[in-house]
Amino acid sequence: MHAFHSCPSPSELKGSLIRKTNPSQIQSIKTEEKQRPFTPLSSCKAMPLSIIFSPLLLSFFLFFSLLQPLTFATQKSYVVYLGSHSHGLEPAQSDIERVKDSHYELLGSLTESKEKAKEKIFYSYTNNINGFAALLEEEEASALAKHPDVVSVFLNKGKKLHTTRSWNFLGLEADGVVPPYSLWKKARYGEDVIIGNLDTGVWPESKSFSDEGMGPVPSKWRGICQHDTKDGVVFHLFPYHLVSYGFPQKIRKLIGTRYFNKGYAAIAGHLNSSFQTARDSEGHGTHTLSTAAGNFVAGANVLGYGNGTAKGGSPHARAAAYKVCWPPINGSNECFDADILAAFDVAISDGVDVLSVSLGGDPAEFSEDAIAIGSFHAVAKGITVVASAGNSGPSAGTVSNVAPWLITVGASTMDRSFTIYVALGNRKHLKGASLSEKTLPAEKFYPLISAADAKIADQSEADALLCKPGTLDPTKVKGKILVCLRGENGRVDKGHQALLAGAVGMILANDEDSGNEIIADTHVLPAAHISFTDGEAVFSYLNFTKTELATKPAPFMASFSSRGPNIIEESILKPDITAPGVSVIAAFTQATGPSDAEYDKRRTPFNTQSGTSMSCPHVSGVVGLLKTLHPDWSPAAIRSAIMTTATTRDNNGEPILDSTNTRATPFADGAGHVQPNRAADPGLIYDLTVNDLLNFLCNRGYSKKNIQLFSDKPYTCPKSFSLADFNYPSITVTNLNDSITVTRRVKNVGSPGTYKIHIRAPPGVTVSVAPSILKFQKLGEEKKFKVTFKLAPKAVLTDYVFGMLTWGDGKHFVRSPLVVRHY
């Protein structure tokens, strides 16, 4: 199941940022279904409107029916993956029809007929990805899986969404001024790069998507702005840009919008006309797309906080929205495999340079994961795909989107906080976070009550402490500041429950898993979110809120950010990198309030959200800049530049901390925190070709048949290939019994130079590198080196240990994380 990655913690996966189904939308679906006109069978047209059955005939009919065997079969929606196409990026209509017909033929050979197959198939992937999505019985799916032309068959699972100052923090500007060394200047602010976003759509009226300063649309663009449909009438997503032919030809910033909902409909049932649009009614997609590619907008703020100029990582990039996520159903699943794969298939042909994917699900084998499949085909065409790591931290082994051709992004804080102070009875002041519009007067005192002590008689203390609906007694809460515990239900909803019970304010205290991570939310009453440590104290009074800049330490890892190890392939470290993902301000929809709750009638053009959904587009924006500056770099080269120039130090010069105040490991922050300016000139890169990726699949046991289907041309697996030699920028060894040697190759992308090795060996392990000096005389020159890991004498390793390998020439420092496990 796929999900947005903007949910702040594992205990809040059903909380405020994992969006609840809008009951009115679901009800409208049901209502429309009920109101659909009844169409009588042609042979019954002359029948009277009233028919009276005789009791004898009715009884006989019922008795006869009971004698018949039950022949109903349950159909489910599946994705059938067939690999690649042999045609190019711009297939002729005859090619597309031929592909569709081959799908009908294949399914028809295993079902009743070709015509029946046409009824079952609701998507044919005809551009870059070969396959289809269809409603199948289990026996049909099983038969297809055994067919020699089929790579994989898997259920159309759902995924969830993984839900400004950050660019100053990342060094692209300094106090509002863009310095000469900034990657923004070097890369012309991402000029003419095209960034696509798979998400909840877009709010096109946002000033972040203004055409101001944009030149003509790049000639390589082949996409469209898909029309909306309502009550059978076609209208336009861009009403202010209508032209005589009904297409927004004047648009230069937001150049593409499409929606994909057939996979969602296969699960949800009939969809009414409100689903036939790429318009964003939820806000997540607008937020992520503007973070990656939003134009400059002065005076941006959220309810008066964080005032400044909003902009994306590539402010002059073109933006394209691919809506694949819809109101949650079946356990908060919003984005379904069949739609995700359809969007990848089309986006590749549209001509995007970068794809940003802030959603994901449980890790799965690559041939059964729509994001892994779609991104493989994108990367094979030179498109860099950036994906969120997930919000299931801090538990180990929770990271998602782990394919080695993806850039996988964790979430950390930045040096801005929206601070609110809690004054204790002993005159001690504790620092919290909030974006509440309302404040309490500093000179007035209010009584404090624990939500556990404010419970209704028949409710448990545990549920009341979480401030769940229906657990609080208004006679105990009224006029007081209520203390609620973080976890399970949404943070903003806890405040809403406190408000309904009559509280004048709320203190939201972290549970132990959330540690010291505090998040500024748009609360509906005066509120302060405080750390687990401070939450153990006794609170008395609430004071005021302000925006603080240059806070320290920053970054530190968000507790919700999913952690490694990679449970699908342990030899590949994931996440790759971390970026700002806490309290990020970006553009927002006007269709819902900042809390996305039905009771929230506020509207704001910008909003703050937290999650790896927010960190992902930060890296997508940086990728856009690097693509503009180095158009010949491969997706692997871009990832290498970002990873090997990352920092593992905070703004105090100390190691980046986890939310528990302990040193973060590569399972939390990957190679470290992104540094865009350094990534522009990494010195050396670890590159990968499509053949390297195919060798990786060979090593995982993919058959020759399947490998050839993944590739658009015949490919034979090498007789010997060690996964330890896969040219990834990080090095992970998972079975160190005595010693092991791995090989890497680096390419010079800078000036000639001599690089020397520096090693910080993992505890209990000795590490040697040969050769220890690499001399490069020209651009593009490649050299190999070997790294040998040995257990130190008498060393006993009971868990993973970590280190760092760095090549340096005095100007460039090319860092690779080392991850080692003994068993």
Image (cartoon, rainbow, N blue to C red):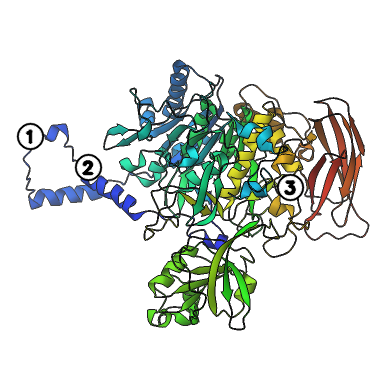
Residue 306 x/y as whole percent: 55, 55
Position of residue 498 measured from the top left corner of the image (x, y, whole percent): 43, 72
Of the image marks 2 and 3, the number of the one nearer the N terminus: 2
Q: Amino acid at mark 1?
A: Ala
Label 1 or label 2, whichever comes before in sequence order: 2
Front residue of this view, candidates 75 and 498: 498
Percent x, y of residue 215: 53, 26
- Element under label 2? loop
Left or right of residue 714: residue 157: left
Q: Point out which mark residue 36 bears.
A: 2
Among the two numbered marks 1 and 3 on one chain, the one whose residue lies closer to the N terminus: 1
SS for callout 3: loop
What distance separates the C-alpha of mark 1 from that of mark 2?
A: 22 Å
Check whether the beta carbons of the residues at disc 1 and disc 2 lie within 8 A of each other.
Answer: no
In the rendered image, which residue does mark 3 sit on?
A: 671
In the picture, the quarter occupied by the C terminus is: bottom right
Q: Nearer the viewer, mark 1 or mark 2?
A: 2
Label 1: state its secondary structure: loop
Badge 1 is on which residue?
46
